[in-house]
Image (tube, rainbow, N blue to C red):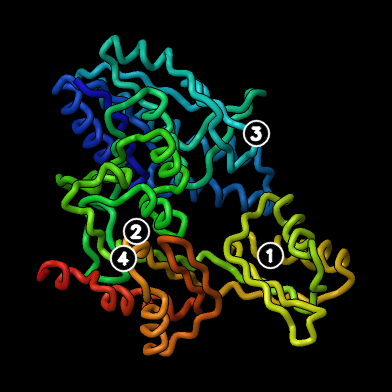
Amino acid sequence: MALYVQKFGGTSVGSVERIKAVAEKVKGFRDDGHQVVVVVSAMSGETNRLIGMANEINDEPTPREMDMLVSTGEQVTISLLALALHKLGVPATSYTGSQVGILTDSAHTKARIQRIETDEMRDDLDEGKVVVVAGFQGVDEEGNITTLGRGGSDTTGVALAAALGADECQIYTDVDGVYTTDPRVCSKAQRLDSITVEEMLELASLGSKVLQIRSVEFAGKYNVPLRVLSSFQDGPGTLIVAESDQDEDSMEEPLISGIAFTANEAKLTLLNTPDVPGVASRILGPIADANIEVDMIVQNVAPAGDYTDFTFTVAKGDYKKTLKILEEQVIPDLGGGEVNGDDNIAKVSLVGVGMRSHAGVASKMFRVLADENINIRMVSTSEIKISVVIDEKQMELAVRALHTAFGLDKSDIESE
């Protein structure tokens, strides 16, 4: 007997018929003698519908009330799934995040899990029940409902698997695994049998929408076996493993495992800022205080040496707020300067642990982009990743060209 935590996303529970299909799948695992905890998202489109209604009423809704509102989507799903399981003769109990004891900090809309109470879940499992938990949500010490950010149901699933010591956390979604890139952009993308936690962490942080980054962090930190599967077809999916757990046959890693991309970025440049110690802190401090995450950073020294241009990227949704902070707080503090901004950019990234042992990846990437007449506006690197910022309109062309150039096309791999 094994303990599985199974997470089903919004498309997997997007209708009554699909909820019934999930119940059948869960029943199959229980009939095989396994214990099952199920984490579900809101039905597809429901969270956006709720957000839309809130914005119609108030275009600057308070974070606390937004958490109260959007958390209701998952409550509907857990009830319907529990009822579907009852209809199949499977005992099941549904819980909201607060009921099951997912305790978080008080950062509304971006809360982080602090601890999870497991006694009640274990009692239910020992009694042969399926435990159905609302993803994406928890409760703070003052009893306020909190949410974990978009995609937070993945984090709920992995966190529960870690807390319960589950044998595997299975993420069921509308794709049958992790691909070398998005098949909707590159038709020659291929499914990976396995990928390292480190590579998946990079892909998730760089725009891959298969898994939320915090769920991958949890899996790596607590050594949770994590598998991405399709809700709509059978198959092995993609197993996400620690690098040390890979098969010996896979020790000679491919150069690149995947290409991530996102247009959810905006670039801001502060021109003519004083080139003195501490200027970066004075620029980024107020932005951090506003809970805005900064991604790529480039600082240039002007020819005179007295002033610098400071460029960085943020999420597109934070663009206007960041621009306002720079204009109203940072520039007055620095005694002058000018802000330029652009929210029509994209970030394209190559990821692969094989980069550790191969030189020339960056130069090849730049050459491929140059051949396509794609201008690079910013560059960022790490041990297993190279990211470039380009014009948004050239993003898909860049992805397809790089996918082919680095031998990731399906026909290339099948012929090896």
User: Which three-letter amino acid code belongs to the residue tagged 2?
Assistant: Val
Q: Residues within 10 Å of mark 1 (few under 14, many from 20)?
A: few
- Residue type at the position of mark 3: Ser
Q: Position of residue 87 (x, y in %)?
A: 23, 22
Q: Are marks 2 and 3 in contact (CB under 8 Å)?
A: no
In the depicted view, which residue is nearer to us: 132 or 237? 237
Q: Which mark is residue 180?
A: none
For marks 3 and 4, give the one nearer the viewer: 4
Q: CA distance from mark 3 to mark 4?
A: 39 Å
Image quadrant where one finds the C terminus: bottom left
Q: Give SS at disc 1.
A: helix
- Please report the residue visible at 81 percent of the width from the left and 64 percent of the height from the top: 330
Report if the CB atoms under discs 3 and 4 are less than 8 Å apart. no
Among the two numbered marks 1 and 2 on one chain, the one whose residue lies closer to the N terminus = 1
> Quick check: 392 left or right of 312?
left
Q: Label 4: which residue?
A: 256
Q: Indicate the position of residue 383 as horizontal and vertical percent values.
A: 44, 61
Q: Which residue is mark 2?
A: 353
Q: Earlier in the sequence, mark 2 or mark 3?
A: 3
Vertical placement of residue 101 versus 304, above or below: above
Which dot marks residue 106? 3
Residue 359: name its quadrant: bottom left
- Asked if residue 41 shows in the view, the reply is no
Judge the density around disc 3: few (<14), some (14-19), many (≥20) Cα neighbours within 10 Å.
Answer: many
Image point 39% across, 29% down: which residue? 162
Which residue is at the front of the view, 164 or 20? 164
